[in-house]
Image: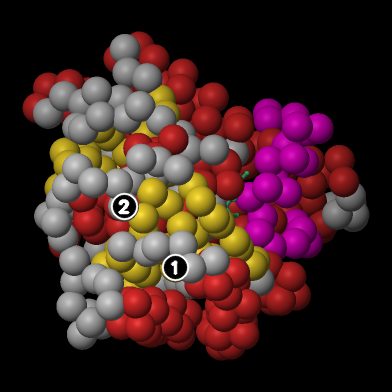
């Protein structure tokens, strides 16, 4: 499709309610986001029931200015999975309703596909590229050959990386979401202060595992407290720095394995870093250094497009609509929807 078009994007799969209007020539006409982080903070993680209700109360307020502007909308793209089903249902139903009311096509967007394609909105990323997707719910490496063409290179065998950051923060008595707090505290800490394991280093393939690291953090905290020390800021900073250093070494090793495999079997033009954890500057540096010897550039969307947002959903809609794709209004919300199943 050569004609310029505009897509309305809706995201509600976790703890962010968001809407955005994005054009096929990469202009973000509008974006609005309401985070529920404060509502979930006391629980140290996202509470599905609270999330679903919050999406319901926020979404109309966010959408109203876009709909009132009477800006032409050529299709509506909404996250229909994977995610917390209550929230996914809210976004899906609102998206279908707007599509039906405006008489335009509906696009059922896979949230992971949106994370995977976002970098193409802001960076000069060409297919095929390799993707490290690290968020609160997901941790995978993929080869992206085209829209809808995803090949799994490796994934976590237990916790997602963002989840590991969040749990580490919770054990240190820090607020949710833990990633940004750990990153900030780590700057003042000694990365060699607390010995932690580097799970999966040297293991064939590119899978991850973070539950052992999480247990090691818990044991180190318990031992520190048993020795009569308090949970003070210097200890928190040392733990944050030690945890981040362990994560960095694991990521670098897994990336090198993936680069070796890709170089042999299926070369790529670049690496893309996506998902909430991609907002971490320290890890961005680690990833860049790990892939540099392979001559591959690293692209990452700006931090606000790394964490959940609706611009990425609208952009995934642009990518699919451009190929003439659209979905039926019977498309169902899905709690689980592996990206590789799209291929
Ligand atoms: O992509 P996202 O917003 O939601 C999911 O789809 O999961 O990712 C949220 C995750 C949280 O676990 C959060 O702690 C983590 O991304 N995160 C970070 C940083 N900013 C957000 N992790 C490490 N460093 C950060 N700066
Ligand atoms: Zn996400």
Report which residue position mark 2 lands on. 5
Give how far across and how far down residue 323 sits, in percent.
15, 51
Q: Is residue 73 left or right of residue 266?
A: right
Could you classify mark 2 by the number of other residues whose Cα lies within 10 Å: few (under 14), some (14-19), or many (20 or more)?
Answer: some
Report which residue position mark 1 lands on. 10
Whole-number angstrom distance, CA of label 1 to CA of label 2: 17 Å
Residue at 36% x, 59% y: name it.
Answer: 7
Give how far across and how far down residue 160 sits, in percent.
45, 56
Could you classify mark 1 by the number of other residues whose Cα lies within 10 Å: few (under 14), some (14-19), or many (20 or more)?
Answer: many
Q: Secondary structure at mark 1?
A: strand
Q: Is residue 207 left or right of residue 282?
A: left
Magenta span dominant secondary structure: loop
Looking at this view, is 219 or 163 the one in front? 163
Magenta stretch: includes residue 173: yes
Tell me if residue 308 can be seen. Answer: no
Residue at 51% x, 41% y: name it.
Answer: 278
């Amino acid at each position: 499709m050569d004609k310029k078009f505009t897509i309305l994007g809706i995201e509600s799969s976790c703890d962010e309610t968001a809407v955005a209007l994005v054009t096929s020539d990469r202009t973000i006409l509008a974006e609005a986001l309401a985070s529920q982080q404060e509502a979930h903070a006391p629980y140290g993680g996202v509470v599905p029931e609270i999330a679903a209700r919050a999406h319901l109360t926020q979404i109309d307020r966010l959408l109203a200015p876009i709909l009132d502007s009477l800006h032409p909308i050529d299709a509506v793209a909404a996250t229909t999975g994977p995610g917390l089903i209550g929230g996914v249902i809210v976004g899906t139903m609102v998206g279908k309703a707007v599509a039906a009311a405006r008489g335009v096509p509906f696009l059922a967007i896979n949230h992971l596909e949106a994370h995977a394609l976002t970098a193409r909105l802001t960076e000069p990323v060409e297919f095929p590229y390799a993707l490290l997707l690290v968020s609160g719910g997901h941790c995978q490496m993929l080869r992206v050959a085209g829209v809808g063409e995803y090949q799994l290179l490796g994934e976590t065998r237990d916790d997602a990386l963002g989840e590991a950051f969040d749990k580490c923060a919770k054990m240190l008595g820090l607020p949710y979401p833990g990633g940004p707090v750990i990153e900030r505290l780590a700057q003042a800490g000694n990365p060699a202060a607390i010995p932690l394991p580097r799970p999966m280093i040297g293991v064939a393939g590119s899978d991850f595992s973070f539950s052992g690291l999480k247990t090691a953090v818990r044991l180190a905290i318990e031992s520190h407290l048993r020795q009569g020390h308090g949970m003070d800021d210097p200890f928190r900073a040392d733990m944050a720095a030690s945890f981040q250093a362990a994560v960095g070494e694991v990521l670098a090793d897994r990336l090198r394995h993936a680069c070796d495999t890709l170089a042999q079997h299926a070369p790529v033009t670049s690496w893309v870093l996506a998902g909430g954890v991609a907002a971490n500057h320290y890890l961005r540096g680690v990833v860049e250094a790990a892939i540099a010897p392979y001559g591959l550039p690293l692209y990452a969307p700006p931090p606000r497009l790394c964490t959940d947002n609706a611009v990425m959903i609208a952009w995934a809609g642009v990518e699919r609509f451009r190929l003439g794709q659209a979905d039926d209004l019977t498309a169902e919300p899905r709690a689980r929807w592996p990206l590789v199943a799209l291929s």
